Image: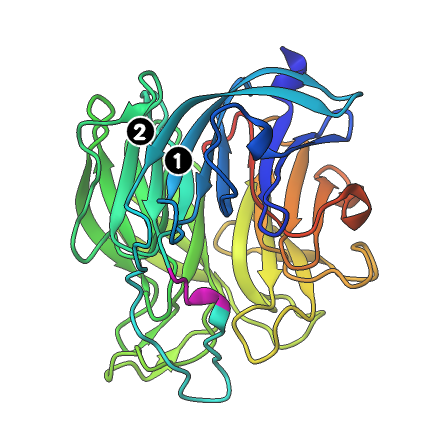
Amino acid sequence: NGKLRTVVTAIDYHTRMIYLFNYKNDKVVTVDPQSINGWPGDLPLQHTMVLPGGKKFYVTTDNTETYPAYIFALKVHDINWNLGTADLEIKAMLPVDLPNTPAELPFVESVNDNQAVPGWLMAGGTQIHGPTILPHSKFVYFTDWTSDKVRVINRKTNDFAAVDPIIIPGYTEQSHGIIFNKSGTIGLGTGYFYDNSVIDRYKTNRKTGDLEPVDQIRLGTEKRHAAFTHYIAWLDERYALTASMQFDKTSLTPPETQKIIPPSVWLIDAWEGTATKIIRHTNNVNGHGVFRSASDLAVVGDKLYIAEEDTIDHTFGEDGYLSVFDISDRFNPRFIKRFKPGVEFPQGYAVAHTLSPTPDSRYLMLASWVSGYVIKIDTLTDTVDKVWGPNDGLVMPHGLHAAGGIR
């Protein structure tokens, strides 16, 4: 069904709507989840993940005083792009905790003028992030970012797998997804919090869904390292890229650390367990480096796209950029361009947060939950092809995922 295969899912933090985008015909359908039979109430939404083919997708919700955090499995019976309607059915409603479960985030404070600790990162209750698919298996994964659990679902039975939850002390705290290579043999986990400077390396079991910790790959050294990683983008079976967000020390910084390496991109050798910095920070909007915090990254052919967001320094949400690099020589990336607010992007655009390439690599979807835009990038010409925004009802879109993608 072509109209389902080209779907990209997302949610809206503010309106609590579900979005279904069609990147082929540039349509969007907005679904009020409370109109879906069996939806329990007005829940704060968080992330989405759609399976290949687009006939089934997942939505995660946050914990509240009244409701637990849930993982919903939704079946798509039909989407009418012209009428703007969708027929959805709840196949599973899986609670991951009890109502009013507090977050278990480390206490952190700012210690200098270079690194702020904004309130948006201090979640009150459980948040389920980082949805991913383990290739060549029946398992999908989510991470309890506010705690220490990896949640594993058998997508055939719509229930938690026998190994769920996976808790590995020192590894699974504040993970934002376990992202797998295409063979599904290696998983890499990010540390989405201050002063987490390691990428967790796992060996997978595609029959049971279990994860076996191998080691942790430090971005730099104990004395000088990069920290606060959001996502992983695999290049091939062996190599992957990650990018960091933190600018400087916080109250969590270990005493032996002399310097935090500011936002940068790292090449990970997932066989050898090493990481090499390949793109450095720049203080210039036209500089050939990472300008703002590197929130997300995507690889399309020989190009690397970096979503740069303005969220964890002392000014919040003033701007947002998308930088593009030629990585045909992956140890020596070459800067191509930076998409800017008021130029390629709409005036007032801020916080380039989430990237999702379409499975044919033709387009790249980019979401800003702060300024209310989802933008479709043409990866052949590196130009903006379509903009959805406030005029389409978007307020705080988040959690993009394209059918056919692993994450």
Q: Is residue 124 visible?
A: yes
Identity of the residue drawn at 81% across and 56% down: 346
Q: Amino acid at mark 2?
A: Ile
The magenta stretch spans which residues? 120-124
Work out whether residue 342 or residue 368 is closer to the camera in this orientation and state it: 368
Give yes or no for residue 224 being in the magenta stretch. Answer: no
Q: Which mark is first along the chain, 2 or 1?
A: 1
**In the image, is residue 64 above or below residue 134?**
below
Q: Which secondary structure lies at badge 1?
A: strand
| x and y, in percent, of residue 216 in the image | 23, 55
Q: Are marks 1 and 2 in contact (CB under 8 Å)?
A: yes
- The residue beneath circle 2 is 153
- The residue beneath circle 1 is 71
Q: Locate the N terminus and report the quarter of the image it occupies.
A: top right
| x and y, in percent, of residue 362 in the image | 68, 31
Residue 250 occupies quadrant:
bottom left
Q: Which mark is drawn over residue 125?
A: none
Farthest bottom residue in view = 112
Q: Amino acid at mark 1?
A: Ile
Residue 137 occupies quadrant:
top left
